[in-house]
């Protein structure tokens, strides 16, 4: 098999599994949590560094939600079986970079990656992230090239793949859709909170041989769980989070 076909095929395989393969990176991070105990002091896990890490991830989360809220319907979805693009996104975040969602994911994962305060997990995860998403981006772009032809080629020629060029900013063609964000992103928010809560529990265990969750993270986790339950219930049991169809003038 030629390298071109191999890249497309492996990218499609990774695309279908992109929702759970990154969990392998979480497993690596959980094994690298170190002690923060200080002799002679009352046991306590310092909250400052975890909050800095969480703030970085939160920036990535906000980026992701803005991108999804501005994307055209039928694009930037969580579909796993096959590539789907009802239209070609070229405005808003997609006027700065061709793969803004993956850039947002990188910022989100940076927070947990630096949490253990070691350099080598960051390097390993960065290399894995690049190899992983490079193949997916290759497969996605091949799909878009085949569907949109010269329109895609011209957009790709002026828009960077991963590092944004802010000089090319074009306002989004559609207003921000908060409903699509609320019905699609609550699971990702909950996963992020669970990861930081797990890191905090392991930090207590390694430092003081206690299975404990810091009260601050317990509150954050509780809010995340309740919000996810409420939004899941609204999505499955009501139409409140469904897109509103425009009404015709009488």
Image: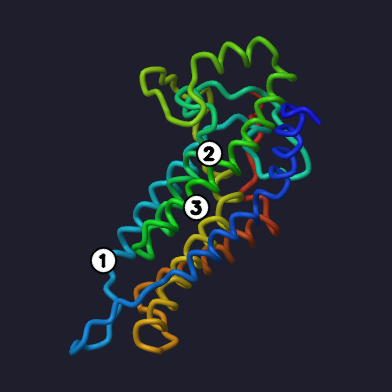
As helix, strand or loop, the secondary structure at mark 3 comes to helix
Q: Examine the image and state in which quarter residue 6 appears.
A: top right
Left/right placement of residue 185 relative to residue 222 reads right
> Residue 48 got which mark?
1
**Disc 3 residue crowd, few under 14, some 14–19, many 20+, Cα 10 Å:** many
Determine whether 231 is above or below 201 in the image: above
In the image, which is nearer the foreground, mark 2 or mark 3? Answer: 3
User: 243 and 247: which one is in front?
Assistant: 243
CA distance separating discs 3 and 1: 23 Å
Residue sitting at 48 percent across and 39 percent down? 103
Left/right placement of residue 205 relative to residue 138 reads left
CA distance separating discs 2 and 3: 18 Å
Residue sitting at 41 percent across and 69 percent down? 220
**Disc 1 residue crowd, few under 14, some 14–19, many 20+, Cα 10 Å:** few
Which of disc 3 and disc 2 is earlier in sequence?
Answer: 2
Percent x, y of residue 149: 70, 13
> Residue 101 got which mark?
2
Residue sitting at 36 percent across and 18 percent down? 167
* Quadrant of the rendering where the N terminus is positioned: top right
Left/right placement of residue 142 relative to residue 94 reads right
Residue sitting at 64 percent across and 32 percent down? 73
Percent x, y of residue 18: 65, 48
Determine whether 47 is above or below 76 in the image: below
**Disc 2 residue crowd, few under 14, some 14–19, many 20+, Cα 10 Å:** many
Tell whether label 1 touches label 3 (CB within 8 Å): no
The residue carrying mark 3 is: 125
As helix, strand or loop, the secondary structure at mark 1 comes to helix
CA distance separating discs 2 and 1: 28 Å
């Amino acid at each position: 098999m030629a390298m071109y076909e191999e890249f497309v095929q492996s990218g499609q395989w990774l695309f279908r599994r992109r929702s759970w393969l990154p969990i392998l990176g979480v497993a690596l991070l959980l094994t690298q949590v170190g002690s923060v105990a200080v002799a002679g002091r009352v046991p306590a896990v310092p909250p400052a560094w975890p909050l800095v890490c969480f703030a970085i991830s939160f920036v990535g989360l906000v980026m992701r939600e803005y991108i999804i809220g501005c994307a055209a319907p039928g694009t930037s979805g969580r579909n796993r079986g096959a590539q789907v693009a009802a239209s070609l996104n070229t405005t808003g975040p997609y006027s700065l970079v061709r793969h803004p969602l993956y850039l947002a994911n990188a910022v989100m994962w940076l927070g947990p990656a630096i949490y253990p305060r070691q350099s080598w997990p960051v390097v390993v995860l960065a290399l894995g992230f690049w190899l992983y998403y490079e193949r997916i981006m290759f497969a996605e772009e091949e799909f878009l090239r085949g569907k949109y032809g010269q329109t895609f080629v011209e957009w790709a020629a002026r828009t960077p793949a991963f590092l944004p060029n802010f000089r090319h900013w074009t306002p989004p063609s559609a207003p921000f859709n908060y409903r699509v964000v609320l019905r699609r992103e609550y699971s990702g928010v909950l996963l992020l909170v669970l990861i930081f809560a797990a890191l905090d529990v392991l930090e207590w265990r390694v430092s003081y041989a206690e299975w404990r969750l810091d009260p601050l993270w317990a509150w954050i986790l509780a809010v995340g769980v309740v919000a996810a339950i409420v939004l899941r219930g609204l999505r499955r049991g009501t139409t409140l989070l469904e897109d509103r169809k425009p009404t015709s003038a009488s």
